Image (cartoon, rainbow, N blue to C red):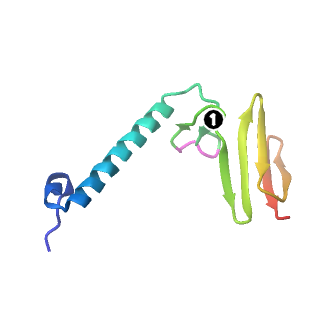
């Protein structure tokens, strides 16, 4: 069975498939440009993948004060910067904050 090279042979596909590929390529290009724009913003106060445990991770700059959601098995925890404070909220239940070291702690969502 011969495989089609979609880059060169989209004209042999049905019109609906050609249109879908065109739309997906446009969306990919938009998202790529958005990521490039975000990653060109080193003044951002919200950075993913930059820390002592993540030194080998790529650095991704998010928009300033971007809300970040952590999905857990029993709900979610959300965090964002507000001024000089990191605000942490949950969808219900209580938060258990357990110190680990002098400059770190664990946050656990306890179901209500």
**Residue 33 drawn in magenta:** no
**Residue 65, image quadrant:** top right
Which residue is found at the position 64% from the left and 46% from the top?
Answer: 53
Which residue is found at the position 23% from the left and 56% from the top?
Answer: 18
Circle 1 Cα neighbour tier, 10 Å, few/some/many (<14 / 14–19 / ≥20): some
Closer to the camera in the image, 100 or 71: 71
**Rendered position, 37 above or below 92:** above
Query: Looking at the figure, which quarter contains the C terminus?
Result: bottom right
Q: How many marks?
A: 1
Q: Residue furthest bottom?
A: 1
Residue 37 percent coordinates (x, y): 46, 31
Which residue is found at the position 25% from the left and 60% from the top?
Answer: 16
Q: Residue furthest top?
A: 43
Residue 36 percent coordinates (x, y): 43, 34
Label 1 element class = loop
**Residue 110, image quadrant:** bottom right
**Residue 55 drawn in magenta:** yes
Disc 1 marks which residue? 46
Side (left or right) of 105 relative to 62: right
Closer to the camera in the image, 25 or 95: 25
Task: Characterize the magenta stretch by its predominant secondary structure.
Answer: loop
Side (left or right) of 32 relative to 87: left
Residue 82 percent coordinates (x, y): 75, 32
Residue 83 percent coordinates (x, y): 76, 28
Side (left or right) of 99 relative to 77: right
> Magenta stretch?
53-57
**Rendered position, 8 above or below 75:** above
Query: Looking at the figure, which quarter contains the N terminus?
Result: bottom left
Which residue is found at the position 30% from the left and 56% from the top?
Answer: 20
């Amino acid at each position: 069975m011969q495989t089609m090279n979609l880059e060169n042979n989209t004209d042999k596909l049905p019109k609906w498939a050609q249109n879908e590929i065109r739309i997906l390529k446009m969306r990919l290009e938009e998202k790529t440009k958005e990521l490039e724009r975000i990653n060109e913003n080193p003044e951002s106060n919200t950075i993913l993948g930059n820390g002592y445990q993540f030194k080998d991770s790529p650095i991704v700059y998010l928009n300033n004060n971007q809300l970040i959601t952590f999905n857990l098995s029993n709900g979610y925890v959300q965090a964002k910067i507000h001024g000089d404070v990191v605000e942490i909220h949950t969808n219900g239940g209580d938060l258990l904050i357990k110190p680990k070291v002098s400059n770190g702690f664990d946050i656990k969502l306890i179901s209500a």
